Image: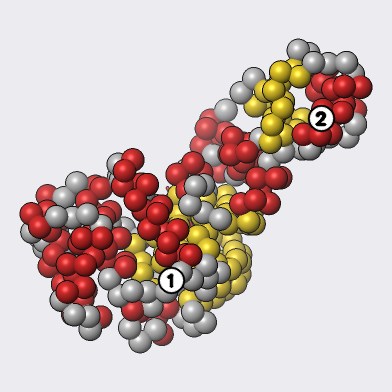
Amino acid sequence: MITVEHLTRRYGSYVAVDDVSFEVRPGSVTGFLGPNGAGKSTCMRMICGLTPPSGGVARVLGGSYTDLPNPGRQVGVLLDAAAQHNGRTGREILSLGAILMGLPKSRVDEMLHLVGLNGDESKRRLRDYSLGMRQRLGIAHALLGDPKVLILDEPANGLDPAGIRWMRTLLRGFADEGGTVLLSSHLLHEIEVVADHFIVIGRGKIVANGPKSQLMAAAGTSVRSTDDMRLAGALQGAGFAVDGVGGAIRTDAEPAQVGRIALDQQIALIELKAAGSAGLEEMFLQLTAADAREGVAA
Ligand SMILES: Nc1ncnc2c1ncn2[C@@H]1O[C@H](COP(=O)(O)OP(=O)(O)OP(=O)(O)O)[C@@H](O)[C@H]1O
């Protein structure tokens, strides 16, 4: 369990994380989403005791991360895959971790095998690793102590499609066995398959927090018809919000309500479906629009 209460971080007059509160529960994969610079990494660094908060508290497994006697055995952290000594080999990095955590040497081979770094690769120095190999090593390091909680900042960064699929299976399995996973990304589609709960941050503030199913439902309905203008007007007339998405109308009405209004208006429907992840992405873009650089440019 991770609990964050009124967490705030200021840099001079700039508020990078602004009174943020949330919980990450065991048995779930929580996707921490937000555009570049929204405050995800700063939050995660505060949870792990690497950045002191200006206000508020973060607890992991009931207490402060820095008070954990052997943190690697309880919390696996991957914040920056490059934050290891470049001159050490992958095997040496894991072996040092194993010594620090009091783990048998065999655990290093187990983890290298788990993340798919073969014998040759494990003997190369970190400076010669590809980005994806660094991420795999970082994941191995996070899992080394068989922790109950995982805190991973953009772990899919640099992984190939097979690697992303492998990581999703691994994280889902970890959560299904009762583990707690906090996983950040700036891309919804990267984590929507694996996450069952989303926390969305924009400009340092939480703008959405809920189970994926609930947020999907809130993303509304997508509809195309032979007369979109008239249908949009009829939906608005009935009190529903209407928005254009990629050639289709998106509305907060249920599909059945849209169908009934179209029937009343004698408008033929070409497509009618729950807006799903495209709707969710659109919703997130709107919720974080104040922070989106493209929005600012526009
Ligand atoms: N040490 C620092 N000094 C000044 N500003 C900082 C510092 N660390 C972070 N910030 C600022 O805080 C804001 C949040 O940064 P953060 O790295 O948490 O964002 P993020 O959501 O993780 O972004 P990304 O998806 O790009 O990694 C940014 O505007 C960043 O410039």
Q: Is residue 124 above or below residue 291?
A: below
Q: Is residue 42 above or below residue 240?
A: below
Per the image, the residue denoted by label 2 is 258
- Image coords of residue 5 (percent x, y): 60, 72
Q: Which mark is residue 136?
A: none
Looking at the image, residue 181 sits to the left or right of residue 86; the answer is right
Circle 2 SS class: helix
Residue at left 46%, top 69%? 177
Residue at left 18%, top 55%? 117
Residue at left 7%, top 54%? 120
Q: Is residue 71 above or below residue 130?
A: below
User: Which dot, 1 or 2, sits closer to the camera?
Assistant: 2
| Residue furthest out toward the top | 226
Looking at the image, residue 270 sits to the left or right of residue 150; the answer is right
- Image coords of residue 261 (percent x, y): 87, 26
Residue at left 15%, top 76%? 105
Is disc 2's CB within 8 Å of ligand 1? Answer: no
Q: Is residue 26 visible?
A: yes
- Distance, label 1 to label 2, CA atoms, is 43 Å
* Amino acid beneath label 2: Val
Per the image, the residue denoted by label 1 is 149
Is disc 1's CB within 8 Å of ligand 1? Answer: no
- Camera-nearest residue between 282 and 196: 196
Looking at the image, residue 170 sits to the left or right of residue 222; the answer is left
Q: Which quadrant would the C terminus be assigned to in this image?
A: top right
- Residue 252, by quadrant, is top right
Q: Residues within 10 Å of mark 2 (few under 14, many from 20)?
A: many
* Amino acid beneath label 1: Val
Circle 1 SS class: strand
- Earlier sequence position, callout 1 versus callout 2: 1
Q: Residues within 10 Å of mark 1 (few under 14, many from 20)?
A: many
